[in-house]
Amino acid sequence: EYALEMAYDDPEEKEETSDFTEVYRGGEITYSLSVFKTGLYKFRVRANSEAGWSNYSAIEDVDVNTVGRAWDNINRGPGIRIVGETAIKTTNGHECALGGIAVTSGTHTWRFRIDSFPRGVWLHFGVCAPGTNRSYNDKTNYGISSAHQMFHAGSLVQTSQRSSKSPFFEEGDIVTVSLDQAKSTLVVSTNQNLSQTFNNLPQISYVPHVNFHNAGT
């Protein structure tokens, strides 16, 4: 088992490089990571065996000068505003935002920070096929909503067993969407230790998919 960690040095910030955070853990010896901000990225890796975790490797620097589009600016809801390089905001309900880069193989992780989440808002995170303004009930959609609703191939398969007294996502949360196309699995998790796994995803191209039902998010 390997654990890959990353830190980021934002050229627009005067603060020191961010702390290392784990971006991948598993048995694969290759890993693909999409980034959407220029700057200096630092990586280190360690291995786990019967003897325990090894020391970290030497830090590898990757200086990124150009990046792809974080969001699809064409196939998006009319109420979706793309702010800067990576932020989105909705001004209407029933809108969707799709990632700008489709993936067809490998393991991929996307992280989202919820800066604004008004009371009563419905929100969905997951993946779907690229190319159209899709909704949570599209047959290629897999993900979970703030109301603990699980969507598998666009169908509501069940409500999470976790308490529905509080939403699955809350303002200030970091939401992680992890897709492993070799294993056909998707995991949507939050920094509040909530996690939901989806299995048997078809072998097609995917983009991250955020779906809104209310304005102000």
Image (cartoon, rainbow, N blue to C red):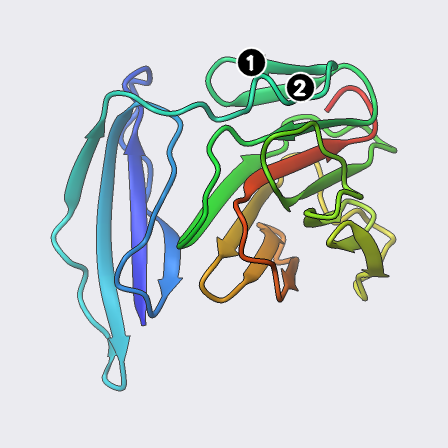
Q: Quadrant of residue 211?
A: top right
Q: Residue furthest left?
A: 58
From the viewer's perspective, tell me whether residue 57 is left or right of residue 43. Answer: left
Mark 1 surroundings: few (<14), some (14-19) or many (≥20) residues within 10 A: few
Decide: is 75 above or below 151.
above
Tell me where residue 111 appears, x and y as whole percent.
51, 40
Residue at position x 55%, y 47% in the image:
176
Residue at image mark 1: 83
Inter-mark Cα distance, 1 to 2: 7 Å
Q: Amino acid at mark 2?
A: Lys
Quarter that holds the C terminus: top right
Tell me where residue 134 appears, x and y as whole percent.
72, 33
Decide: is 80 above or below 195.
above
Quarter that holds the N terminus: bottom left
Q: Earlier in the sequence, mark 1 or mark 2?
A: 1
Residue at image mark 2: 89
Q: Secondary structure at mark 1?
A: strand
Decide: is 170 above or below 132.
below
Q: Tell me if label 1 and label 2 are in contact, CB under 8 Å.
A: yes
Q: Residue furthest bottom?
A: 50
Q: Secondary structure at mark 2?
A: strand
Tell me where residue 58 appears, x and y as whole percent.
11, 53
Q: Amino acid at mark 1?
A: Val
